[in-house]
Image (cartoon, rainbow, N blue to C red):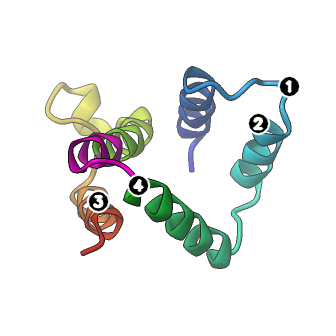
C-alpha cells in the first residue's frame, strides 16, 4: 500500500464520520501500518454481510456499490503511468477483478 492509498483510506474514513481522535481511527491507522491477519478480514466480511442482510435490496445494492467505489478510489490514488498520461483510471485489471469478487461476496454469491 502506498502513502497516497493510506491517505485516501483515512480521508474516506473521516468523510464517513470516523473522528480522528477516536479509537476506531487509531485502530485503522495501526492496520494501515501493519496488515491484520486474514481472520480479521474474514470476520469483517461476515459482519458487513450481516449488516447488509437487513437492508432492502435497493439499499443493499447501494451500500455494496459505495464500498466497492471506495476501494476503487483507494486503488486509483496511486495512479500509475496510465493515469498520469490520462489513459486510464489507475486501477489495474487485477484490482478490478478483486472488486468484482468482493461485490459478489457481499451480495452472497
Q: Which numbered disc covers residue 48?
A: none
Badge 3 element:
helix
The residues bearing labels 4 and 2 have C-alpha atoms spaced at a distance of 26 Å
Q: Residue at x 61, y 71 (%)?
A: 43
- Location of residue 73 (image quadrant): top left
Magenta region, main secondary structure: helix
Q: Which residue is mark 4?
A: 54
Contact, mark 4 vs mark 1 (Cβ under 8 Å): no
Q: Report the disc number at residue 25.
A: 2
Q: Are marks 2 and 1 in contact (CB under 8 Å)?
A: yes
**Residue at 22% in and 37% down:** 82
Marks 3 and 1 close (CB-CB < 8 Å): no
Q: Are marks 4 and 2 in contact (CB under 8 Å)?
A: no
Q: Is residue 59 magenta?
A: yes
Q: Residues within 10 Å of mark 4 (few under 14, many from 20)?
A: few
Bounds of the magenta segment:
54-64
In the figure, 100 relative to 60: above or below?
below
The CA span between labels 4 and 3 is 17 Å
Specify the quadrant of the image occupied by residue 71. Answer: top left
Q: Secondary structure at mark 1?
A: loop
Q: Are marks 4 and 3 in contact (CB under 8 Å)?
A: no
- Mark nearer the N terminus (3 vs 1): 1
**Residue 23: horizontal and vertical position, in percent?**
85, 39
Query: Reading the chain from its start, which is encountered first: label 4 or label 3?
Result: 4
On-image quarter of the C terminus: bottom left
How far is the residue under mark 3 from the one under mark 1? 31 Å
- The mark found on residue 103 in the picture is 3
> Looking at the image, which residue is at 73% across and 54% down?
31
Q: Which residue is mark 1?
A: 21
Relative to 107, residue 32 above or below: above
Amino acid at each position: 500500500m502506498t502513502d497516497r492509498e493510506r491517505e485516501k483510506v483515512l480521508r474516506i474514513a473521516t468523510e464517513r464520520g470516523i473522528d480522528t481522535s477516536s479509537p476506531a481511527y487509531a485502530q485503522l491507522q495501526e492496520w494501515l501500518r501493519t496488515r491484520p491477519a486474514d481472520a480479521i478480514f474474514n470476520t469483517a466480511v461476515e459482519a458487513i454481510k450481516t449488516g447488509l442482510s437487513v437492508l432492502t435490496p435497493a439499499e443493499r445494492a447501494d451500500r455494496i456499490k459505495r464500498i466497492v467505489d471506495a476501494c476503487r478510489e483507494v486503488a486509483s490514488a496511486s495512479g500509475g503511468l496510465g493515469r498520469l498520461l490520462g489513459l486510464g483510471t489507475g486501477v489495474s485489471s487485477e484490482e478490478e477483478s478483486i472488486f468484482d469478487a468482493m461485490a459478489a461476496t457481499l451480495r452472497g454469491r
